[in-house]
Image (cartoon, rainbow, N blue to C red):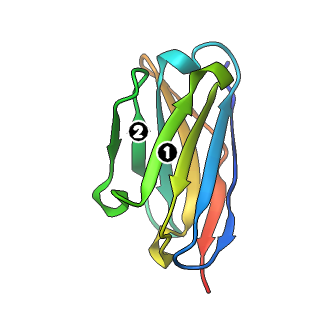
Amino acid sequence: QVQLVESGGGLVQPGGSLRLSCTASGSIFRSGIMGWYRQAPGKERKLVAQIAAGGSTNYVDSVKGRFTISRDNAKNTGYLQMNSLRPEDTAVYYCNLKYGTIDYWGEGTLVTVSS
């Protein structure tokens, strides 16, 4: 069983930055596709960014140029660097690891962008 633990959420002013981390237990992290999803109040959970085992990335259009996803397989940890944050980025952010047909999820970390 894989456990994912997120950290780094919090309250930030518009234009500020946060860095989310996701640490995985077990040995499959380096072979899986890691992603960050977010769910705003009253809305569906949606993909924000993904990084493949080989390092290729993709982003939803609304965060391109502002967010950067990365991973350190030696530490079983993935990251989401979020810059130029906007109020509409407010959501619970979830770490996801896809391994074969199985999805693993963290419990989420709240990001609030407000003045």
- Number of callouts: 2
Q: Position of residue 1 (x, y in %)?
A: 67, 18
Residue drawn at x 64%, y 13% is 27
Mark 1 residue type: Trp
> Quick check: 40 above or below 74?
below
Q: Position of residue 14 (x, y in %)?
A: 54, 79
Mark 2 residue type: Gln
Question: Dot 2 corresponds to which residue?
Answer: 50
Q: Quadrant of the C terminus?
A: bottom right
Residue sticking out furthest to the top? 27
Are the two marked residues, 1 and 2, in contact with CB atoms closer than 8 angstroms? yes
Please report whichever mark, 1 or 2, sits nearer to the chain's N-terminal start.
Answer: 1
Q: In the rendered structure, find residue 36 and report the number of the disc placed on it.
A: 1
Q: Nearer the viewer, residue 17 or 89?
A: 17
Q: Going by the image, does 18 lie left or right of 59?
A: right
Q: Going by the image, does 21 lie left or right of 14?
A: right
Is residue 22 visible in the rendered image? The answer is yes
Q: Position of residue 3 (x, y in %)?
A: 69, 28
Q: Going by the image, does 22 lie left or right of 71?
A: right
